[in-house]
Image (cartoon, helix red, strand yellow):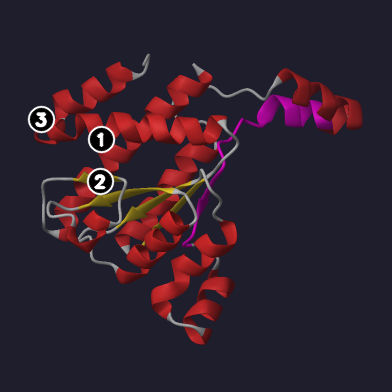
Amino acid sequence: MNSKYILDELLNRYNNLRFLEESVLKTVEVILETFRSGGKVLVCGNGGSCSDADHIVGELMKSFEGHRSLAEELQKELVRLSPETGKMLAEKLQQGLPAISLTVHSALITAIANDIGGELIFAQQVTGLGNQGDVLIGLSTSGNSQNVINAMIVAKAKGMTTIGLTGETGGKMRDCCDILLNVPERRTAYVQELHLPVYHTICMMIEKEIFG
């Protein structure tokens, strides 16, 4: 894996995360396989983890550290359809990787919470959006967020891969995750401080592998 040096940099900076090396590598491999087969990544979390979910999607849907020019065929088609505007679009737009945060659809989330229950706000979205071969990333510092756990159960029922970012114990999510990234902290703030470099590394490795 040409991007392995990015993981090595993380582990050199955060020696306490070294035990997660194989889990991070597996996470990257699974997500790469999903993207290359036409699948997508769904992400969810609450509170600060909600912000992290949005952050992950932001790093995947546009250029992060590398350059992602549009495919030449798409650039040509844009120019053909609209010579002036198409040229601008071809020059400025970047290739994105299909990722969706389940935390941002306020009308849908409030309807689900009001009509069927707040613990189902993510599970309902996975029911509608998730397909076999997709990935669900769930963030919970305790590992016990019921709405994230419910989403993971639905994801597994639909043949998706479930990846959990949690704190040290893994909580109840441990039993729902195909891959568990349980950083070695228990206090919410400290767990979140370690989640960020982990998911940044994963996103950088994916970008490197796909776009060079």
Instruction: Give coordinates of residue 14: x percent, y percent.
Output: 14, 32
**Which residue lies at the image location 38% right of the left edge and 26% below the top edge?**
205
- Which mark identifies residue 188? none
Contact between labelled residues 1 and 2, with CB atoms less than 8 Å apart: yes
Q: CA distance from mark 2 to mark 1?
A: 7 Å
Which residue does the numbered mark 3 point to in the structure image?
Answer: 15
Name the front one of labels 2 and 3. Answer: 2
Is residue 40 in the magenta section?
no
Q: Tell me which amino acid carries mark 1.
A: Ser
Assign a secondary structure to mark 1: helix
First in sequence: mark 2 or mark 3? 3
Instruction: Give coordinates of residue 169: x percent, y percent.
Output: 12, 55
- Which mark identifies residue 180? 2
Assign a secondary structure to mark 3: helix
Q: CA distance from mark 2 to mark 3?
A: 18 Å
Q: Tell me which amino acid carries mark 2.
A: Leu
Q: Nearer the viewer, residue 24 or 77?
A: 24
Give the magenta part as a residue range. 86-103
Q: In the displayed structure, would residue 178 be above or below residue 6?
A: below
Say whether residue 85 is left or right of residue 202. right
Instruction: Give coordinates of residue 153: x percent, y percent.
Output: 38, 62
- Which mark identifies residue 23? 1
First in sequence: mark 1 or mark 3? 3
Query: Looking at the image, which residue sits at the far bottom?
Result: 115
